[in-house]
Amino acid sequence: SSSSSSSSSSSSLRMSFPRLRSERPKSSMSSSESSSSSSSSSSSSALRPDVITYNALISACEKGKQWEKALELFGDLRERPDLAPDVITYNAVISACGNGGQWQKALELFDQLQERGLEPDLI
């Protein structure tokens, strides 16, 4: 019974990623709205994930055995000039890689964590 509920929840997680990562859903805009979407005010009102959101997504990927997606999200976060990965982010992505059999990548990420001056914790 528990395996069927976890498989249905993981499929709903996969379906929600595009909506969570989407900064401007274009399919829901009318033509008049899409023409005004190039203004600077619409880009400032776009929802953008914060570190907590990235951590939750990477953790969900780890639980769903999606280490490649976890690395992709981690890369997206690192490219954001206004955000930086924290210890929780590194824990989640290292765990995702470890669970996915990517131990070399997990070790590289652990080294990065220390190089950034972050203290590893027990989780």
Image (cartoon, rainbow, N blue to C red):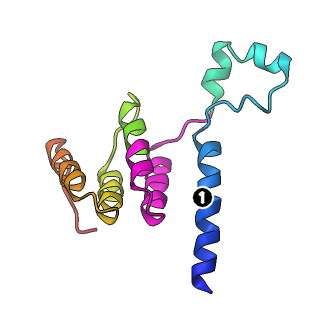
Q: Which residue is rendered at x = 36% and y = 59% of the image?
A: 96
Q: Is residue 56 on the magenta stretch? A: yes
Q: Looking at the picture, how far across and down is residue 59, in whole percent? A: 44, 59
Bounds of the magenta span?
47-72
Position of 115 compared to 82: left or right?
left
Position of 78 compared to 19: left or right?
left
* Relative depth, front residue between 107 and 37: 107
Q: Secondary structure at mark 1?
A: helix
State the image quarter where residue 115 is shown.
Answer: top left
Looking at the image, residue 30 lies above or below residue 72: above
Residue type, mark 1 in image? Leu
Residue that protrudes farthest toward the bottom in the picture:
1
Residue marked by disc 1: 13
Looking at the image, residue 96 lies above or below residue 51: below
Q: Is residue 105 on the magenta stretch? A: no
Q: Which residue is rendered at x = 77% and y = 19% of the image?
A: 34
Looking at the image, residue 36 lies above or below residue 14: above
Q: Which residue is rendered at x = 64% and y = 53% of the image?
A: 15
Considering the whole magenta stretch, tell me its main secondary structure: helix
State the image quarter where residue 103 is shown.
Answer: bottom left
Q: Looking at the picture, how far across and down is residue 10, in whole percent? A: 58, 65
* Number of numbered markers: 1
Q: Looking at the picture, how far across and down is residue 84, in whole percent? A: 34, 39
Position of 51 compared to 7: left or right?
left
Looking at the image, residue 1 lies above or below residue 114: below
